[in-house]
Image (spheres, rainbow, N blue to C red):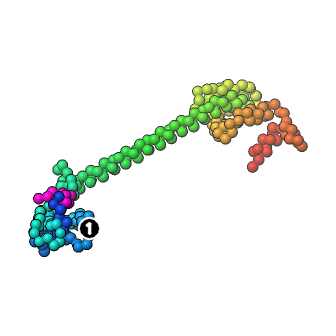
Amino acid sequence: MIQNVTNVITWLELNKLDWFTVSTTKDDNSKVFDSVEGESFEDRKNRFIETMRLSHGGRYVIKAKANKTAGRGVFMEEFANVESGSAPAVAGVQPVVSGITTDEVERRIADALDRDRKARELDDLRAQLKEAKAELKESDSAMNRILNRAEPLIGMLMSKMIPGTAQMGIAGTHHTIPVDGVVEDQHEVTEEEIDEMSTRIELAIAKWGGADPQFIEVLEFIADFAADGKKIDAGFIQLDYPTVKGMMLKK
């Protein structure tokens, strides 16, 4: 018996058999393929291959001869309806690969592809998390740099708003700010008020620093303007600090 369809083609070519029929048994009344007059041998071979791919049977009989009119020298062989390199199909039994059915092979391949996809998705998530952590760290470092630059000015502002306070720390830093000056009529400031004011200043400084790289220079100008009582020449009017502040805070 010929083991596969590819070998059947080789058998036909070796024996120069151009005209052939295929049946499920040796009886010609059970044909599944027959040669057609007028088609080339190449077309006939290709049609035979496609017919076998569509057939579900496992074993067939081929009868072949040199041409349609040849009355003698008819060849006959049984063959397995499988492609080259495949296992023969047996009715009711699945082909196996090394003891594993084709369905199991396909399932294992699908599982392997799914695991590979999940592994790649996990790698992508890890990369995104690493990038997010780096951005958060950079953002935190930038805020600390802004606060460190603004620390002396915060101290000066606090000393004007809360005279007589000894020392206070900036949240999130390891520094303390000396606060000098005593005013008798200044009301006693609680620690809660100091913490709240410090937090508001820090948030404002961080937001300002993120919007304007030169905020330190502007902040120094405002602090000096408030402290020395000088006026700004606006051309047609002289503006002092209370006037400017009223304009900025006007809603």
- Is 208 left or right of 73, judged from the image as shown? right
Is residue 139 in view? yes
Which residue is farthest right?
236
Q: Which residue is mark 1?
A: 40
Looking at the image, how many numbered discs can be counted on the residues? 1
Where residue 146 appears, x then y in whole percent? Answer: 64, 33
**What span is in magenta?**
1-13
Seen at 15% across and 67% down, the residue is 65
Q: Is residue 143 above or below residue 177?
A: below
**Disc 1: CA contacts within 10 A as few (<14), some (14-19) or many (>=20):** few
Seen at 10% across and 69% down, the residue is 72
Give whichever of 140, 100 is nearer the camera.
Answer: 100
- Is 57 left or right of 153, judged from the image as shown? left
Seen at 17% across and 71% down, the residue is 68
Seen at 11% across and 71% down, the residue is 71
Give whichever of 7, 183 is nearer the camera.
Answer: 7
Give whichever of 206, 86 is nearer the camera.
Answer: 86
Where residue 149 appears, x then y in whole percent? Answer: 66, 30
Give whichever of 147, 201 is nearer the camera.
Answer: 147
Query: Could you tell me which quadrant the N terminus lies in?
Result: bottom left
Q: Is residue 71 above or below residue 7?
A: below
**The disc labelled 1 sits on which kind of residue?**
Ser
Magenta run includes residue 4:
yes
Q: Which quadrant of the view contains residue 189?
A: top right
Where residue 195 appears, x then y in whole percent? Answer: 62, 34
Q: Which quadrant of the view contains residue 164?
A: top right
- Is 142 left or right of 183, judged from the image as shown? left
Magenta run includes residue 236:
no
